[in-house]
Amino acid sequence: MFSGGGSSVPWKTMNSERQIAEIVELSHEKPQLIFKHSTRCSISSMAKSRLEREWNLENLEPWYLDLIAFRNISNAIASQLGVHHESPQAIVLKDGVVVYDASHNSISVSEIAKRVS
């Protein structure tokens, strides 16, 4: 499990393309969030920090993808889920489909909450 340095978000780390299918499957039981983070981008760091500060979503399983280390997984996410690649990006899956896709300053815990309630 990835720890974001005092983060209240119980991040799970994505490090394999196989996890995409697993996350889609898990989304039938509980909504899943994929957060694609560029460790070289200050906007991405701000979006991640805001997510962690505002996190109050117990009914959502959060996954963290280090975009720099695993660009191939990010490309596979875009292809398999039919979303345009962004960085940073938050993608929420529920019942096997993308119900939320936002990037940069549009990433919002309150908007995510609306999609998973």
Image (cartoon, rainbow, N blue to C red):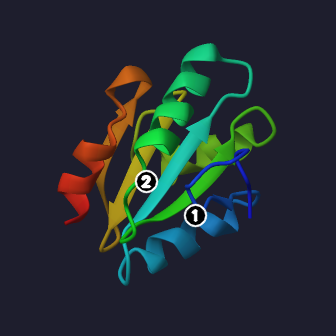
Residue 80 tag number:
none
Please state the horizontal and vertical placement of residue 41, each as a whole percent of the image.
66, 17
Q: Is residue 65 above or below residue 46?
A: below
Q: Amino acid at mark 2?
A: Leu
Q: Amino acid at mark 1?
A: Ile
Pick the front one: 110 or 79: 110
Q: Secondary structure at mark 1?
A: helix
Please state the horizontal and vertical placement of residue 88, each as a whole percent of the image.
53, 29
114 relative position to 60: left or right: left
8 relative position to 114: left or right: right
73 relative position to 52: left or right: right
**Residue under numbered circle 1:** 20
Q: Is residue 59 above or below residue 83?
A: below
**Residue under numbered circle 2:** 81
Report the quarter where the N terminus lies. Answer: bottom right
Outermost front residue: 6
Mark with earlier residue (1, 2): 1
